[in-house]
Amino acid sequence: MKNRILLYVFILLCLVGMKQYAYGLNYEIDSTNKSVEDTLTERIYTIGLDYGTNQSFKGRNNGKQQPYYTPNFNYQAKSGFFIYLSITNVIVLKNDTSEQAQEARDHSIDEWQINPGYNFKIGKNTDASISFSHYFVKDTAIINSGIKNNIDYNMDHDFLIINEKIIFDLDLGSETDFSVALESYHSFDIDNVFTKDNDELSFIPGFTITAGTQNFYVTKEAPKHPNLKKTTSTTQFNIIAFDFILPLSYNIGNFTFMPAFNYSAALNQPTGLKSKPIGFGTVSLTYDF
């Protein structure tokens, strides 16, 4: 009963958010006669390197500490079109003797990702994006190894005191999953911390609640649990995760450095599968040119 109440509250919040997006669009569309080219004025190339002390995907984890690193490249055109490319390698600790760890040792690259998409504006205060991702997954050390393709649509509205982002995900693999995430965050910015006009420090705390199905997790874990079967808990749309993030971003010139503390907790997990809540750190370094 408690889980159903949480789900109903989540749906209500999403509907309220959608109403605000629609209001913003109707209110601003006549007063903002600008094309996407007017709002996205420059072509951007970005190279980056991400590092995490552990993996988490929609609240799920492997039950062991598995650090990773992800070199990546992103290109965004003036039109709003972008393409993101990345490779991920799981760093296996010496004392990890699990089957997943052995799989990771056998591959120098655990996952390739290609992600083309399109960014655009909805009125003055809402950014939107639609994208398609394809994953070339080599082993089950990757949390989302049960997913081959993903279609994502999101809208991010600036309410001045807080940003609300709603994310719709369709995950395609041997099974299909659908999820909706509602993210709330605010950016506290300080300009010119160490220079006169060329740097910025930002603190961007955020909270995300995700509802959806979780067939991907059962698909990933099935080889290790022969008796594991798909049940109502995996196919039913329900609250599946809470995530907190506390990032600190420092930008100087073309460089951005962003360490963050993350906390992820899974809810309504399939019978026999338990991901404990974890806290972990991430670091991102990017260069725009």
Image (cartoon, grey):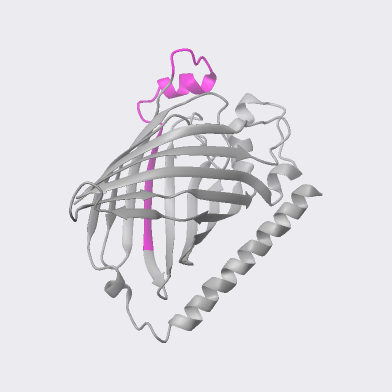
Q: Is residue 100 magenta?
A: yes
Instruction: Give the residue displayed 68% in from the left and 26% down from the top.
Output: 226
Task: Classify residue 213 as left or right of residue 51.
Answer: right
Instruction: Give the residue displayed 53% in from the left and 20% down from the top.
Output: 99
Task: Classify residue 15 as left or right of residue 249.
Answer: right
Q: Is residue 231 magenta?
A: no
Instruction: Give the residue displayed 71% in from the left and 29% down from the top.
Output: 272
Q: Is residue 3 above or below residue 155?
A: above
In-front residue for pair 41/131: 41
Q: Quadrant of residue 126?
A: bottom left
Q: Is residue 41 above or below residue 188?
A: below
Q: Is residue 12 visible?
A: yes
Number of numbered discs: 0
Q: Quadrant of residue 70?
A: top left
Q: Is residue 144 visible?
A: no
Instruction: Give the residue displayed 61% in from the left and 44% down from the top.
Output: 241
In-front residue for pair 216/276: 276
In-front residue for pair 82/182: 182
Could you say where residue 50 lies in the image, as x and y percent from the top left? Answer: 35, 37
Could you say where residue 37 lies in the image, as x and y percent from the top left? Answer: 28, 73
**Numbered range of the magenta stretch:** 93-118
